[in-house]
Image (spheres, rainbow, N blue to C red):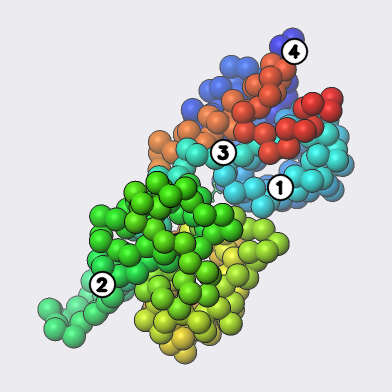
Amino acid sequence: MSAKPRVFVSRVIPDAGLSVLEKHTSPAIWPHDRAPTRDELIRGCKDAEALVCLLTEKVDGEVLTAAPTVRIVANVAVGFDNLDVAAGTRAGVVMTNTPGVLDDTTADLAFALLLCTARRLAEGDRLMRTGTWGGWGIMQLLGHDVHHATLGIVGFGRIGRGVARRAVGFDMKVLYSDEFPAPPEVERELRATRVPFDELLAKSDFITLHTPLLPGTKHLINAQTLGKMKPTACLINTSRGPVIDEAALVVALRSGTIAAAGLDVYEHEPKLSPGLVELENVVLLPHIGSASYATRGKMAEMAANNVVAFFEGKAPPNALNPEVLTRA
Ligand code: GLV
């Protein structure tokens, strides 16, 4: 590398990533504890050769046109629905994500949310904090058993399989639906059976979503699919908010179409659909699926390494559109 490439980093990221960037590049870091607006993002990218961004930044053709010096966009997230990869390819810009390093951490959170929702932990916590607990009650905060229940996993990739691995310890029966069957040894190890989506909806006590947000998965959970679930079902979402039609979910939770939901992601983050916060039978987390010290460090480091590899003339290990590299 000759002159150090200029990199705009759209938020303070963990040191594990910043130290790599500081060593090999010339980073300019967005100093505020909020996402830059679109204009601020474009201004930040002025003269930058790389952008390290988070899932809160929408990087599309318009941004790339307004920031023509940027040659690589490294997303500090595995989900990349915030990136228009096709626009990147057209503009000759490499885009990367952070697969693999957050699978177990996100699976832990999904399982924690499942337990929290099933056993009404957040309601119990609210009861204690408001000083309204009158003592042990035999009918108090009755929830749903997780052990021996049927878990339906929608999307059986790395994170979905991680949740299945955790479910084995709870003696759950695991169903999954995915476009592709898992190898037989994986199905055996995780005691998981692939079923059609409608069957999963009808048979599961818990349904957990682990699909990327794609045109075909937007509103996969809607009034109709909610109506196919058991009235005792709990729905867990740690994937992407728009996979659920949130307005339809509010109606379903209110009317008892399903029993409860545990959400870490929302259709219009950071806004919540009207009616959601008033419901007792929903647990709401602020998109913290991968939020452990170790994992966020690994994600930042991975994004930084993609940028460094690119400027060293190597293929970034996590390129989403590697065809850009061979075309150059
Ligand atoms: C977090 O949601 C991620 O996609 O990494």
**Side of 56 where 290 appears, left or right:** left
Residue 82: where, in percent of width, then height?
68, 51
Q: Secondary structure at mark 1?
A: loop
Between disc 3 and disc 2, whose residue precedes? Answer: 3
Between disc 4 and disc 1, whose residue precedes? Answer: 4
For the residues labelled 2 and 4, the Cα–Cα distance comes to 60 Å
Between disc 3 and disc 1, whose residue precedes? Answer: 1
Residue 204: where, in percent of width, then height?
40, 73
Residue pointed to by mark 4:
3
**Side of 33 where 138 appears, left or right:** left
Residue pointed to by mark 2:
145
Q: Amino acid at mark 1?
A: Leu
- Do tag 3 and tag 4 residues touch (Cβ < 8 Å)? no
Residue 103: where, in percent of width, then height?
45, 45
Q: Residue at x 48, y 74 (%)?
A: 199
Q: Amino acid at mark 3?
A: Thr
Residue pointed to by mark 1:
83
Front residue of 154 and 221: 154
Q: Amino acid at mark 2?
A: Asp
Q: Is the CB atom of the residue marked by disc 3 within 8 angstroms of ligand 1's nearest atom?
A: yes
Q: Quadrant of residue 325?
A: top right
- Do tag 1 and tag 2 residues touch (Cβ < 8 Å)? no
- Do tag 2 and tag 4 residues touch (Cβ < 8 Å)? no
Q: Residue at x 59, y 25 (%)?
A: 305
